[in-house]
Image (cartoon, grey):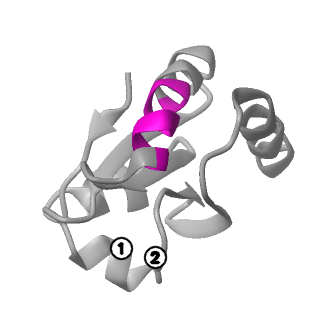
Amino acid sequence: MAQAVTDKDFGAEVLQSDTPVLVDFWAEWCGPCRQLSPIVDEISRDMAGRLKVVKVNIDENPEAPTKYGVRGIPTLILFQNGKNVAQKVGALPKTALSRWLEDALA
């Protein structure tokens, strides 16, 4: 299950993580975000140990999405060593999301 992260703990949970981190920027009112949510949770379980998965509610935590230029949601950003290394906007099927992550982590 993806872990909820706030603006306060974004640095510690994402930027300072030793493991690559997939951040799902989402909002309650966003239909595609709700569609993507169970897929992101499955990825979290499937890639446990290789990848940390977190969710940031953009309405409650406006700092991180602003800092990383999130304009549309859902936006997925993969961080490695505190840096944005890959980014996708929009809901993806699980196969496409898994392939994108495998390529980005290779």
Task: Please indicate whether residue 49 sits to the left or right of residue 105 in the image.
Answer: left
Q: Residue at (53%, 47%) from the top-left corner?
A: 22
Q: Which residue is mark 1?
A: 65
The region drawn magenta spans 32-40
Q: Residue at x 62, y 16 (%)?
A: 46
Q: Position of residue 36 (x, y in %)?
A: 51, 37
Q: Secondary structure at mark 1?
A: helix
Q: Is residue 93 left or right of residue 16?
A: right
* Residue 47 located within the stretch drawn in magenta: no
* Depicted 91 relative to depicted 61: above or below: above
Q: Quadrant of residue 26?
A: bottom left
Expressed as whole percent of the image width and height from the top left, the position of residue 84 reads 59, 69
The answer to whether residue 38 is above or below residue 7 is above
User: For mark 2, what is the residue?
Assistant: 70
Q: Circle 2: is it few (<14), some (14-19), or many (20+) Cα within 10 Å?
A: some
Membership of 39 in magenta stretch: yes
* Frontmost residue, 69 versus 71: 71
Left or right: 73 as drawn, with respect to 11: right
Report crowding for label 1: few under 14, some 14 to 19, many 20 or more residues within 10 A (C-alpha): many
**Labels 1 & 2 near each other (Cβ < 8 A):** yes
* Snapshot quadrant of residue 103: top right
Q: CA distance from mark 1 to mark 2?
A: 5 Å
Q: Quadrant of the N terminus?
A: top left
Query: Is label 2 in a helix, a strand or a loop?
Result: loop
Q: Position of residue 54 (x, y in %)?
A: 38, 42
Do we see residue 42 in this rendering? yes
Residue 16 visible in the picture: no
Q: Which mark is residue 15?
A: none
Q: Main secondary structure of the magenta part?
A: helix
| Quadrant of the image containing the C terminus | top right
Q: Residue at x 68, y 43 (%)?
A: 92
Kind of residue indicated by mark 2: Val
